[in-house]
Amino acid sequence: MDPLKEKPAILSLQYHSYPDAMGGAWNLTHAINKRLVDRGYRVVLITCKPEEKLLDREIVDGVEFDRIPNALSKNPIRLWFAIRKRIKKYLIEDEPWIAHVHNPLVGAFAIAIKKYRKIPKIYHFHSSWYDEEKINLTETNEVAINLYVRLKIIRWLEWVCYHYSKSILFLSDYTRKRFLNYFPFRKPRMRIIPGGTDIEKFCPSENTNEINEIRKKLGIPNGYKFLLTVRRLEARMGLDNLITAIAEIVNQSPELKFKLVIAGKGSLEGRLKSQVMLTGLDNHIHFSGFVPDEFLPKYYAAADIFIMPTEFIEGFGIATVEALSSGLPVIGTPIGGTTEILESIDKKLLFKDEKAKSMAEKIEWFLKTPDYIFSLRSKCREEALKKYSWDLVTDRVEEELKLIWGKK
């Protein structure tokens, strides 16, 4: 077999993936993988079970899922052995392979396999694990020495992945710059390929009955503006600042009629709900919990505006482009990839900064004079069609696969 004349099989490495778990990086991994399968590639995903009831092996949308049991994934040594066992099994097969690494822990553990080190590798840098874990561990009041050691290990794992890769893909210029801040020396091929969205699934709706049904379900009275955010309820997402901003608006302009719906789940759910209760915002903020993927487009279609309140490190923001594709204007903090996405539509869609005061000012401006933001609906949809369809994203990833395979 001449591997240069054949499509390589793709070994996709990710800690979790859609539909097993929900999250921007996990959705991106599966969206690209299933489209590569449609284009004639064999894609094998090595991933971990978020819950034990999932099958060990299964084909999902043409992608071969090989899942590591949840109990093994929580122990680094056992996870390392599990990854080795699975990757070795595939690499003895008589076909050419290329690795597409989405997670630095799984990718770094695979490096210990000699055959794996010899195949071409692309590292998809979704965001800095070091940055995210630093925030999360600080939130848990980790002992300083433990925090230092864990972060050093994380930095090393990320370095291992990029060091052995032929190419690194970034979701935004922001993530590329964050990467170069930490790893400025050896520079393999680098390319920015933004995240995407299903432009057919997330689209404007003229079904007024369906829209009214969603608004009624969420307790949004007639004549009220529907503000929506879809976020994991975790540190860095800026939801506490957004709740504070809503409190300021209610205190300053109690006559304004609106309701904010926060969709998602996470470890800060109890704390955020307490904040809402203590500030007397029960009539203005509703927690819808986790919204199943099949219902999410209806939420976007029914909303008047989407809010992206990120406080730290937003590598891209899949929810942002899902909203844009739905013809739903987004206002967001000028953090990371959000700036790059929204600036090309209209700079007025950006808050001045990530502080609650700035959020309150911009949201109140929208509530009092919504026509300008509403006039951007068609432009939001056009931007998604032009830049963020999953087919376009997959085109670019496939170009990179072909180039790296040819350079192996």
Image (cartoon, rainbow, N blue to C red):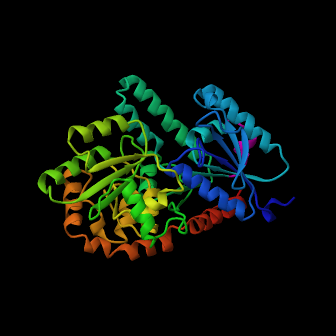
Q: Where is residue 1 in the image (x, y as percent from the top left)?
A: 87, 58
**In the current view of this chain or complex, which residue is farthest to the right?**
1
Residue 272 drawn in magenta: no
**In the current view of this chain or complex, which residue is farthest to the left?**
252
Residue 118 drawn in magenta: yes
Q: 142 or 175: nearer the eye?
A: 142
Quarter of the view holding residue 212: bottom left
State the residue at coordinates (26%, 59%). Answer: 351
Q: Report whether 343 appears left or right of 400.
A: left
State the residue at coordinates (63%, 33%). Answer: 52
State the residue at coordinates (40%, 54%). Answer: 217
Q: 346 or 190: nearer the eye?
A: 346
Q: Position of residue 195 (x, y in %)?
A: 51, 60
Q: What's the magenta region?
A: 111-120
In the picture, the quarter occupied by the C terminus is bottom right
Q: Is residue 270 above or below residue 24?
A: above
Q: Position of residue 322 (x, y in %)?
A: 46, 62
Q: Is residue 7 above or below residue 69?
A: below
Residue 256 seen in the figure: yes
Q: Position of residue 224 (x, y in %)?
A: 27, 62
Q: 186 or 95: nearer the eye?
A: 95
